[in-house]
Image (cartoon, rainbow, N blue to C red):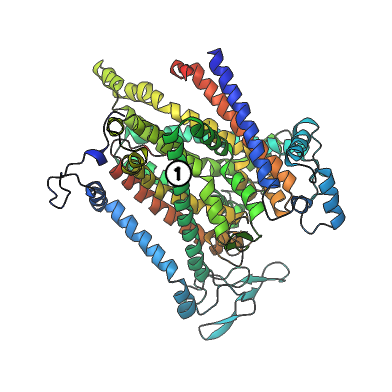
């Protein structure tokens, strides 16, 4: 790790707008952007991701003007018109004794495009609303995780000594918890209760609870490599030189350590977001994630569990949505990593 | 060498202690709710709550509560559930362990074989279509939630196609112990194994491929090539052997995590009565002592698995003995 970081040594004589001494502060980021734009995979996956985000944001429009239903109210007695004939959303079961009802299957029309769930709610509309929550939770948890991991990792690596001892051991311990079990433990004591932290109040069923839980459980996975990176940077020539020049530790941290750690953090972001989407769906599937009547891709999967054999679309649609989104995030993340860190192709 | 082993074991004990404290604090010291009411389960009577408070010493200081809990989990092993009246927790976990172990070990064999073959094949055909195909499938495997894959597998094997020749041999969902009927045990486990292994084949295959390709830039590979070794020999004997070490380390960790109960999703979807499903059922009735026990059991298993892997690495790689 003797090589000085590119951020510290990038001379950009070609860029006339750079600072007086030719040190460019924007240079590396511009190169990252150029690298991303040069990759068709990155451009296409980013565009498709933007499309997914836009689609979920348009959920209220879809529900109101296309499907014409309220996807949060049960529609057990609702009727829709197909070919001019009224059809009940919950249909009399034709199997067995003919007792009970089965929700309507995919109509492939504007109403109940993907059918209804066990409470007669429009699956397509819920898919879009659920996507909003899934993406919001995954995104917020990603940011939360990166911020905490950066603070913990930098503190441990830069301060060393007792701070490092405590933090590293804590990281090791949390690392040993299987992620889902830790999340289940945290959820079970947090979900369904309201909390008040001074002026802030978290109501039960708030999305903040899953965000906190998912954001926390992956902290060790990011904090550990960050700590390692900071330790290596501490020994690097330019940090030692800065120290030798008598620059204050705070300034070294801000100007030399942080910019170099930020690339590691950014490489983690898309992969973490992908992981968080899957984690959210798993927790919601186990009923310790998003709480009803709120929707997320995970809760729709849970709704679909009992309808798996009669109405597989309720499970199929959110699963495919998760798969496509995660796939795109990983594809984008791979390119981003190669662009930011051309030397090592290894992630994690 | 002895000192290294000793210090590793000491660290294992320290981490275990820390984990038990963290778990205890999550369940007993989270603010804004009464642990006695939580342990008593949903809609418990006031007398039950009082009984719990007395039973767990919840009116005494935290460290006494912690001591009591650990004593009942590890020494007397008589921790009982309140939500499921009178269920002994430690025996219940012990009874569920074999199912989890069969699920995870079978899947582990598949994913190690599949992952290593995928990684080597993709590295050997790097940049050409077999590589692209394998990496594409791996990426999909990593992108799908495991319980969803399980549901889709059930949809195919348990639904309309169940009565055709293709899947008629698949028994109904559930677990049959090996000692009862080995044949049925095997047939009922095939799809759970494949489902669980699929994800890890993707992960390991991708990781091994990158490892091998990185190793190709090392000096000893150049030397091996210069000696005139065949491409296949360089790939299998030199590059793969060196790139496989991180895979083995990761395997120890993943295996521990899964046996510890992270296979909960697979177990739930396929109705396998393992430790994970035990946790899931405890979750439904909010049986806190049971959840705490399974979480502790799981993390201890992970810590032990990690220590074993580290000790093995000490044996394999002398450089690590200094650390």
Would you name the residue on which mark 1 appears? A151
Q: Is residue B23 visible?
A: yes
Q: Is residue B71 left or right of residue A169?
A: right
Q: Position of residue B118 (x, y in %)?
A: 41, 36
x 52%, y 35%: residue: B110
Q: Position of residue B38 (x, y in %)?
A: 74, 52
Q: Position of residue B156 (x, y in %)?
A: 56, 53
Q: Residues within 10 Å of mark 1 (few under 14, many from 20)?
A: some
Give the residue at the far right of this rendering: B47
Q: Position of residue B113 (x, y in %)?
A: 48, 32
Q: Is residue B275 visible?
A: no
* Picture mark count: 1
* Among the 4 quarters of the image, the one containing residue B318: top left
Q: Nearer the viewer, residue A184 or A324?
A: A184
Give the residue at the far bottom of this rendering: A84
* Among the 4 quarters of the image, the one containing residue B58: top right
Q: Is residue B273 above or below residue A312?
A: above
Q: Is residue B233 left or right of residue B297?
A: left
Q: Secondary structure at mark 1?
A: helix
Q: Is residue A204 above or below residue B190?
A: below
Chain holding disc 1: A
């Amino acid at each position: 790790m003797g090589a000085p970081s590119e951020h510290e040594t990038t001379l950009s004589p070609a860029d006339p707008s750079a600072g007086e001494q030719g040190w460019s502060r924007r240079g590396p980021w511009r190169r990252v952007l150029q690298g991303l734009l040069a990759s068709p995979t990155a451009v296409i996956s980013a565009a498709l991701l933007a499309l997914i985000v836009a689609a979920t944001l348009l959920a209220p429009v879809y529900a109101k003007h296309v499907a014409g239903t309220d996807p949060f109210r049960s529609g057990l007695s609702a009727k829709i018109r197909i070919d001019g004939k009224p059809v009940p959303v919950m249909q009399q079961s034709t199997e067995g004794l003919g007792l009970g009802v089965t929700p309507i299957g995919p109509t492939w029309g504007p109403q109940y495009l993907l059918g209804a769930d066990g409470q007669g709610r429009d699956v397509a509309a819920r898919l879009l609303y659920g996507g909003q929550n899934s993406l919001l939770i995954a995104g917020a948890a990603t940011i939360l995780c990166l911020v905490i991991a950066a603070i913990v990792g930098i503190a441990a690596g830069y301060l060393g000594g007792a701070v490092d001892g405590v933090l590293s051991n804590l990281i090791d311990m949390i690392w040993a918890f299987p992620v889902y079990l830790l999340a289940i433990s945290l959820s079970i004591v947090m979900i369904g209760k309201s909390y008040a932290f001074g002026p802030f109040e978290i109501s039960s069923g708030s999305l903040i609870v899953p965000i906190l839980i998912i954001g926390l459980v992956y902290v060790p996975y990011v904090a550990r490599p960050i700590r390692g990176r900071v330790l290596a940077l501490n020994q690097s020539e330019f940090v030692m030189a800065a120290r030798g020049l008598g620059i204050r530790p705070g300034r070294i941290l801000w100007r030399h350590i942080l910019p170099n750690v930020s690339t590691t953090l950014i490489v983690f972001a898309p992969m973490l977001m992908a992981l968080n989407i899957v984690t959210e769906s798993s927790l919601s599937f186990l009923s310790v994630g998003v709480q009803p009547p709120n929707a997320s891709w995970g809760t729709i999967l849970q709704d679909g569990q009992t309808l798996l054999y009669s109405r597989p679309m309720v499970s199929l649609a959110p699963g495919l949505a998760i798969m496509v989104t995660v796939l795109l995030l990983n594809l984008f993340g791979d390119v981003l990593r190669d662009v930011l860190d051309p030397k090592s192709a290894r992630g994690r | 060498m002895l000192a290294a082993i000793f210090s590793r074991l000491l660290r294992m004990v320290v981490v275990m202690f820390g984990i038990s404290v963290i778990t205890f604090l999550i369940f007993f010291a989270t603010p804004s709710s009464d642990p006695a009411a939580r342990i008593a389960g949903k809609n418990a009577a006031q007398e039950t709550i009082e009984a719990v408070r007395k039973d767990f010493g919840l009116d005494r200081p935290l460290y006494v509560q912690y001591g009591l809990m650990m004593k009942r989990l590890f020494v007397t092993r008589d921790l009982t559930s309140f939500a499921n009246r009178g269920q002994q927790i430690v025996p219940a976990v012990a009874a569920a362990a074999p199912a989890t172990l069969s699920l995870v070990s079978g899947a582990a064999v598949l994913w190690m074989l599949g992952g290593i073959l995928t990684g080597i094949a993709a590295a050997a055909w790097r940049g050409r279509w077999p590589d692209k195909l394998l990496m594409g499938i791996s990426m999909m495997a990593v992108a799908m939630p495991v319980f969803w894959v399980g549901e889709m597998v059930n949809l195919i094997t348990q639904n309309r196609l169940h009565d055709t020749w293709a899947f008629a041999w698949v028994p109904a969902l559930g677990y049959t112990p090996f000692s009862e009927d080995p044949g049925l045990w095997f047939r009922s486990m095939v799809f759970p194994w494949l489902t669980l292994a699929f994800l890890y084949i993707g992960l390991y295959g991708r990781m091994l491929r990158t490892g091998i390709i990185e190793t190709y830039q090392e000096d000893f590979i150049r030397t091996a090539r210069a000696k005139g070794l065949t491409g296949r020999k360089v790939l299998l004997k030199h590059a793969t052997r060196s790139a496989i070490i991180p895979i083995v380390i990761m395997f120890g960790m993943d295996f521990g995590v899964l046996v510890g109960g992270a296979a909960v999703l697979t177990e739930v979807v396929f109705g396998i009565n393992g430790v994970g499903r035990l946790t899931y059922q405890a979750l439904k009735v909010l049986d806190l002592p049971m959840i705490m026990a399974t979480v502790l059991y799981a993390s201890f298993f992970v810590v032990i698995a990690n220590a074993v892997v580290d000790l093995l690495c000490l044996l394999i790689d002398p450089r690590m003995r200094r650390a």
